[in-house]
Image (tube, rainbow, N blue to C red):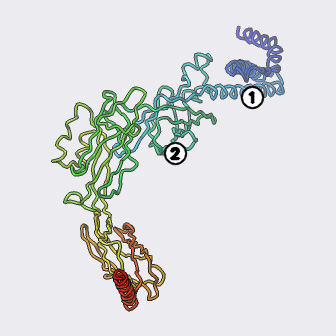
């Protein structure tokens, strides 16, 4: 019986061999649609590989029983090798084509150190191995070893509209992204934006870019406050404006009150809308508008005090408070809040700094702007200098635009120091040349000094000096005598004529 079974098996191989050779020799012809429909191409390559593998096994058995030549076995091995390579290439093509990485969520949140971060959730949306096996109807060990449910080496970065990287780290690498196991990446925003472009590079070099509008982290109930002009120097008696950027991070409230904390009561303050200029005390956000702008305007008193000290910085805060905590800083005039206390309150705030600066103001007063002198005389005038500013004046000098060949003398020649509210008198003497003709002469006085390293100029004054010609006494008396004699002669002549 065993011999009969062996003979039947050999007969089957001999009869089937020509057909197997034809099938193995013909192989799988290239179909142009295989590049377009790679999944069908993979099925075709899988069937060809299975046929070549079966043919090789048969040729091996025949060769072992000396029923076929070595050339037939080598040919079957060559066909099997080509079919295997084709099968593996088709499999890799399908796997790389089906790889797909997407972004599940991109949440922008506000860190405790004041920086903006994006919490990015990256997911493998390729479908997983179970879907592949069901679709391809294969359970091949090679297919399993390639792990179709894993995308390797995923590179992620955030870009702005100019394709510049605005994230830190600049690029994050996910070594393996498993289907059904999203990975969360945290990026610090180097540029504060509400929409970013997510750049993805993965697999065999596949690149994707997604323009994403960032969600806000609504788990917190606060408004992030920031200011680009957080530190300013302001002259006493002047006003300053701080720009405020407000960004909502809340899922419960959309209205917040603005409070200036630790700002001295001597400094008047008001919050304003930067567009309309209207005063505001609260800001309201909408579903479509989660970022707003505001400004804080402060006005300093004109004189320093125990609280407002020149060149001593004042540190204060601007906080955005939810409505239920509106009275939190009602006793702000009596309490100085620290940054640690504000952190414990869990409210959005920004730290601002104000440095009062004083500047001297030079007031020039002259009681006499016009004087008449005779030829050969000098004009004596006085000038009063008063510091009406909020800081000391130093190195006050005065310059004169004199007529040609005129000279001047001043006492003192300059004023080295003038405190706030202090005044001083300057005596001036203007000496015309001996040959000065009679007439009116203009003398322009310019005053300047320094205050806290900055130049200060006083109001220019114009003085008028009129020079009169010297009178001739002898000639005047002679003319008077002639006139008197003439009048006397006329009277005498008239009296004599009337007597006749």
Res. 66 image quadrant: top right
Binning the other alpha carbons within 10 Å of mark 1 as few (below 14), some (14 to 19) or many (20 upward) gives some
Q: Is residue 61 visible?
A: no
Task: Mark 1 or mark 2: name the one nearer the start of the chain.
Answer: 1
Q: Position of residue 297 (x, y in %)?
A: 32, 46
Res. 483 image quadrant: bottom left
Q: Is residue 352 above or below residue 79?
A: below
The residue closer to the viewer here, 399 or 338, is 399
Q: Position of residue 202 (x, y in %)?
A: 58, 35
Quadrant location, the C terminus: bottom left
The residue that label 2 is drawn on is 170
Binning the other alpha carbons within 10 Å of mark 2 as few (below 14), some (14 to 19) or many (20 upward) gives some
Is residue 239 toward the left or the right of residue 50 in the image? left
Q: Residue at x 38, y 45 (%)?
A: 243
The residue closer to the viewer here, 95 or 421, is 421
The residue closer to the viewer here, 129 or 480, is 480
The disc placed on residue 438 is none
Q: Position of residue 73 (x, y in %)?
A: 79, 25
Is residue 95 toward the left or the right of residue 57 in the image? left
- Work out how far the residue at label 1 is from the one at label 2, CA to CA, in angstroms: 45 Å
Indicate the secondary structure of the residue bearing disc 2: loop
Q: Is residue 184 above or below residue 440?
A: above
The residue that label 1 is drawn on is 81
- Check the image and name the residue furthest to the front: 500
Quadrant location, the N terminus: top right
Instruction: Give yes or no for contact between labels 1 and 2 (Cβ–Cβ under 8 Å).
Output: no
């Amino acid at each position: 019986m065993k011999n009969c079974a062996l003979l039947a098996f050999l007969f089957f191989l001999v009869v089937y061999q020509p057909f197997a050779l034809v099938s193995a020799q013909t192989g799988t012809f290239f179909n142009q649609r295989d590049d377009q429909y790679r999944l069908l191409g993979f099925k075709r390559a899988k069937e060809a590989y299975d046929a070549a593998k079966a043919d090789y096994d048969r040729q091996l058995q025949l060769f072992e029983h000396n029923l076929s030549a070595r050339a037939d076995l080598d040919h079957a091995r060559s066909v099997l090798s080509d079919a295997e390579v084709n099968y593996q290439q088709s499999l890799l093509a399908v796997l790389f084509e089906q790889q797909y990485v997407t972004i599940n969520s991109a949440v922008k949140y506000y860190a405790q150190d004041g920086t903006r971060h994006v919490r990015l959730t990256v997911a493998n949306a390729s479908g997983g191995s179970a879907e592949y096996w069901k679709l391809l109807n294969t359970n091949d060990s090679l297919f399993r070893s390639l792990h179709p449910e894993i995308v390797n080496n995923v590179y992620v970065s955030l870009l702005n509209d100019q394709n510049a990287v605005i994230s830190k780290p600049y690029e994050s690498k996910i070594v393996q992204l498993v289907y059904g196991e999203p990975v969360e990446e945290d990026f610090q925003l180097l540029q504060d934006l509400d929409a970013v472009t997510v750049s993805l590079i993965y697999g065999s070099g596949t690149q994707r870019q997604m323009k994403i509008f960032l969600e806000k982290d609504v788990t917190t109930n606060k408004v992030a406050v920031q200011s680009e002009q957080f530190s300013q120097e302001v002259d006493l008696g002047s006003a300053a404006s701080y720009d405020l950027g407000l960004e909502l991070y809340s899922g419960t409230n959309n209205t917040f009150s603005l409070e200036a904390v630790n700002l001295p009561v001597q400094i008047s303050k008001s919050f304003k809308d930067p567009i309309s200029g209207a005063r505001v005390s609260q800001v309201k956000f909408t579903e479509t508008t989660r970022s707003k702008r505001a400004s804080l305007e402060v006005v300093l008193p004109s004189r320093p005090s125990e609280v407002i000290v020149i060149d001593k910085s004042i540190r204060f805060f601007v906080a955005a408070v939810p409505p239920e905590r509106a009275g939190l800083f009602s006793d702000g005039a009596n309490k100085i809040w620290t940054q640690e206390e504000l952190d414990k309150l869990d409210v959005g705030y920004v730290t601002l700094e104000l440095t009062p600066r004083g500047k001297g103001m030079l007031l020039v007063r002259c009681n006499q702007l016009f004087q008449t002198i005779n030829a050969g005389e000098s004009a004596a005038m006085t000038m009063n200098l008063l510091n009406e500013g909020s800081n000391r004046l130093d190195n006050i000098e005065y310059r004169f635009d004199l007529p040609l060949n005129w000279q001047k003398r001043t006492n003192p020649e300059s004023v080295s120091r003038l405190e706030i509210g202090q005044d001083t008198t300057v005596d001036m003497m203007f000496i015309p040349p001996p040959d000065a003709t009679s007439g009116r002469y203009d003398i322009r006085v310019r005053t300047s000094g320094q205050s806290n390293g900055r130049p200060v100029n006083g109001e220019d004054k114009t003085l008028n000096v009129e020079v009169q010609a010297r009178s001739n006494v002898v000639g005047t008396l002679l003319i008077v005598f002639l006139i008197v004699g003439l009048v006397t002669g006329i009277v005498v002549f008239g009296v004599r004529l009337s007597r006749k």
